[in-house]
Image (cartoon, rainbow, N blue to C red):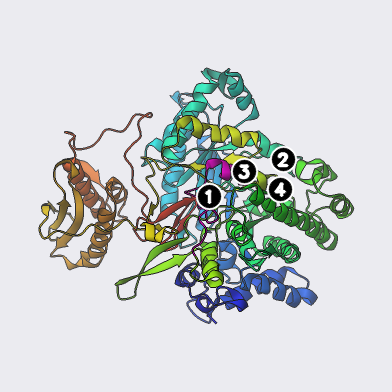
Amino acid sequence: MTLRHKILGESAMFDIAIAEEIWTAKYRFRPIEGDGDSSFGETAARVAEAVAQAEEPGVREAWAARFEEAIRDFHFIPAGRVLAGAGTGRTVTLFNCFVMGTVPDSLDGIFEHLKEAAVTMQQGGGVGMDFSTVRPSGAPVLGVGAEASGPLTFMDCWDSMCRTVISAGQRRGAMMGCLRIDHPDIEAFIDSKRDAARFRNFNISVLVTDAFMQALEADAEWPLVFGGRTYRMVGATALWERLMRATYDCAEPGVIFIDRVNLANNLAHCEAISASNPCGEQMLPPYGACLLGSLNLARLVNRPFEPDAVLDEEHLGELTRTAVRLLDNVIDISRYPLPAQEAEAKAKRRIGLGITGLADALLFTGAVYGSAEAVALTKRWLSVIKREAYRASALLAANKGACPVWDPAMLDTPNLLSLDDETRSLIEANGLRNGCLTSIAPTGTTSLLAGNVSSGIEPVFAYSYERRIRNPDGSTRTEQVEDYAMHVWRSVKGDAIPPADLFVSAQTLKPADHLAMQAAAQELIDSSISKTVNCPEDIAFEDFAEIYIEGYRLGCKGMTTYRPNAITGSILSTVSEKKAEGLAIHPPLEPRGEALHGTTYKLKWPDSAHAVYVTINDVGEGPERRPFEIFVNSKNMEHYAWTLGLTRMISAIFRRSPDVAFVAEELKAVFDPRGGAWMNGKYVPSLLAAIGDIIERHLAGLSPRETVVAPRPEPEVAAAAPRPACPQCGSASLVKSEGCNTCLECGYSKCG
């Protein structure tokens, strides 16, 4: 059967188009010649057979069958890179993300590392970098009589590179940029995302040390240093407030408690960590890689919504052992963009086994997300996973050998000290096959693939929403999409109204509920957790800042929050009371009036024999006037197809968002490889950029400001910024979750 007819496995039917479309677009293997995957079952078989090649010939068939069974029924979901690439023969990596090597403080070295990042993203890996090793702005550059431009200008180079490198031929790369709290350029780094046009391909995080947290508690002065030189002193309280203000206003930077990360690292005897992957769940050393997979807790609860509902812990343990072996095998069959990444991965054999569907599993057992009962169940289930993962790795070490960097000193690290005596004895006898075993990653599209189960460790974001689907003939249809738990509720309870006190969501929970769940999970996870603490827009700044302090006190390794704000906009709007359990993804379309105000601009482009005419029609009056639609016309039919597509897309954005300045910004960044043209005394890199310039001038004409081009905002002023529109389909449907942007309309996902 196809995925559409069998998304819930053997026991139930579930017709969910979004899962089949995501499978088709992202994970289905369709070679130019020969047979590919005709069903998700064949995808599971392809992946299982490829991964089993790392086994001895006599047991390959048996292990392939076990791997296939776990994947086919969505009990275990390997990360997207594994699903898409394993067994295809394509030159792609099966690792989702990497931390790149230590960036040297030299021009040649910096650009060599830029090249390495580009090569890594080209093969499908996201990248994280620590830029703390680059000298600050204004520092002398000996030998050339110049001053350094600082790490942020080099981050601009990475950002530009990322815009042009298509990751694995399908999606653009994701990046994480980190800077230490004691770097002299930390204030500029903190404020960088206030410019909505800067670092758009980066997530950014500040590396906060224990020493800084102590200085903050003491309200002491804090030194900003580089290369042993103290550049200046700042108040720890003032610097922390600046960081919190930026996060309150812009949702970034995130915070990584870097000393805690290194203290709790199983491999502290042989590595130092100073950066994370783009979504923050894997803190990694230079050239470290994260190999991800998730156990789907939502599929393991027997008798959901019944009084005796219980998660099958025996099955969970069996799945954990299977998953550890599967991921360990991937290390041996994967390609690697760089030799240094392969050497690092095979020396430490780090894996990131995590979970998804936690919120749905809690719903099935009647536990409210964030409650004491939910915390207890989360700890119980993760304890099973931790115990069985370590035992499986120790048995693998006995069978295949421990990882090359294994050292008995690892038994004295926090994660191993908390193991039971039986497991520790097994490890003492055999060592460990894998240096680190667990993390909790975001599972955006793979969760949708599995029937729209709740993502990772997050609460349910929306129980129901409408998704627009474009048909092959260009028309569209709407389809209701439900969270997996809501679908099961209707299957079990019929028309009974779901209890509001149980069916909580990311929007209705208090920040303390998010923190309680993150801290509970972190106790039992080797690496880290990708988790977003959702906050109401009207939360007081002091309460918001306290979230980070409390997260540190509770033992979290990193913190990310999201609050609707002027930079990132609001994500979703609630629907009417009749649909109280759901959320609307699309703002309502404004009807077109019979007559609109319009302006037509004539554009003469050197390569075109005929002029191009750009017409922008507006709605509203006075200060409420804004663009509604755009038309691009020319006698030159060469441009017809792309101009038609462009105008339909831009018009769709105009109708859905009151703030569309980003449309002009994106078009103005397009470069034509054949060359641009000089127009009105400035170089315009492409015809699309010229159209973007027209849109920008038109928007400026609607503004009460006298200047045509708005001045660049000062660091303390929030820049007007785009509401979240999907870069793949153009709809205002981006959900910010676990540090990643995911489109609930087309399935696009980007952790950067």
Figure check: 232 above or below 466? above
Residue range in magenta is 497-518
Q: Which mark is residue 669?
A: none
The quarter of the displayed image where residue 47 is located: bottom right
> In the image, residue 379 lies at what x, y percent?
70, 50
**What is the C-alpha distance between the residues marked 1 and 2?**
22 Å
Task: Judge by depth and name the residue closer to the eye, 454 or 712.
Answer: 454
Nearest the viewer among 692 and 17 is 17
Q: Which residue is mark 4?
A: 524
User: What kind of secondary structure does the magenta stretch mostly adopt?
Assistant: loop
Q: Which residue is mark 2?
A: 264
**Residue that label 3 marks:** 516
Residue 511 magenta-highlighted: yes
Q: CA distance from mark 3 to mark 4?
A: 13 Å
Q: Residue 738's mark?
A: 1
Task: Tell me whether circle 2 and circle 4 mark residues in contact (CB < 8 Å).
Answer: no
Cα separation between marks 3 and 2:
20 Å
Counting residues from the N terminus, which is met first, the one under dot 1 or under dot 2? Answer: 2
Q: Position of residue 307 (x, y in %)?
A: 66, 63
Name which of mark 1 and mark 3 comes first in the sequence.
3
Mark closer to the observer (3, 4): 3
Res 185 seen here: no
Residue 468 relative to residue 560: left or right? left
- Residue type, numbered disc 4: Leu
441 vs 632, left or right, is: right
> What's the CA distance linking mark 2 and mark 4?
11 Å
Pick the residue in front: 196 or 491: 491
Q: Which circle, 3 or 2, is nearer the viewer?
A: 3
Query: What's under tag 1, amino acid-wise?
Result: Glu
